[in-house]
Amino acid sequence: MDRLILLRHGEAERDAKSGDDFDRRLASRGAAESAAMGETLAELGLSPDLALVSAAARTRGTWAAVAPAFPKAVARFEDSLYLAEAETIRVLAEAAGATAGTVMVVGHNPGLQELAVQMLVQGGAPPALIARAQNGFPTAAAAVFLFDHAGRPSYDGLFFPGR
């Protein structure tokens, strides 16, 4: 894997009709913010080869909103990404990176935020940038990292939706 894009799902409805958190869908604002984030990333040349998407309704909806910006990307829905911890996300991304240059993970907090902060620290990012990520990773936010030949991350972008 040359690049990893961590994308938090868009804003979701408060409650699903089923009452199950897994079934919460994107709110209209979440769909719009997600689509805009996809366009922003694509305009910057940050397009995934493979997207690992949590199987939850709100992450599937987020992928549906961003997918038009990434017509060449292949999506793979992963049950294990639902509310996954940082280490689980990283292991799945690294495994997928064996066959894909740029991997996107569409998932949930707190795992995505924790992984983004860990990678910023590992990559020697400026303290102000680390603090910004620690203070919040809102819905439809993205963090992008490059990897060297030894698999060490370095910061390549932190994007928050325009609210």
Image (cartoon, rainbow, N blue to C red):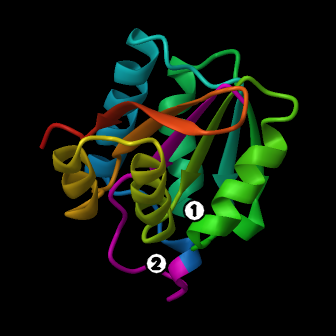
Residue 95 locus on image (x, y percent): 83, 47
Q: Is residue 45 above or below residue 62?
A: above
Amino acid beneath label 2:
Ala
- Which residue is the extreme one toward the bottom? 19
Stretch in magenta: 1-21
In this figure, which residue is indicated by the disc labeled 1? 57
Total count of labels: 2
Q: Quadrant of the N terminus?
A: top right
Amino acid beneath label 1:
Ala
The residue at the point 81 percent across, 41 percent down is 96
- Asked if disc 1 and disc 2 are in contact, CB closer than 8 Å, the reply is yes
Element type at mark 2? loop
Q: Would you say 77 lies left or right of 22 here?
A: right
Mark with earlier residue (1, 2) = 2
Q: Nearer the viewer, residue 162 or 131?
A: 131
In this figure, which residue is indicated by the disc labeled 2? 16
Q: Would you say 125 lies left or right of 145 here?
A: left
- Report whether residue 9 is seen: no
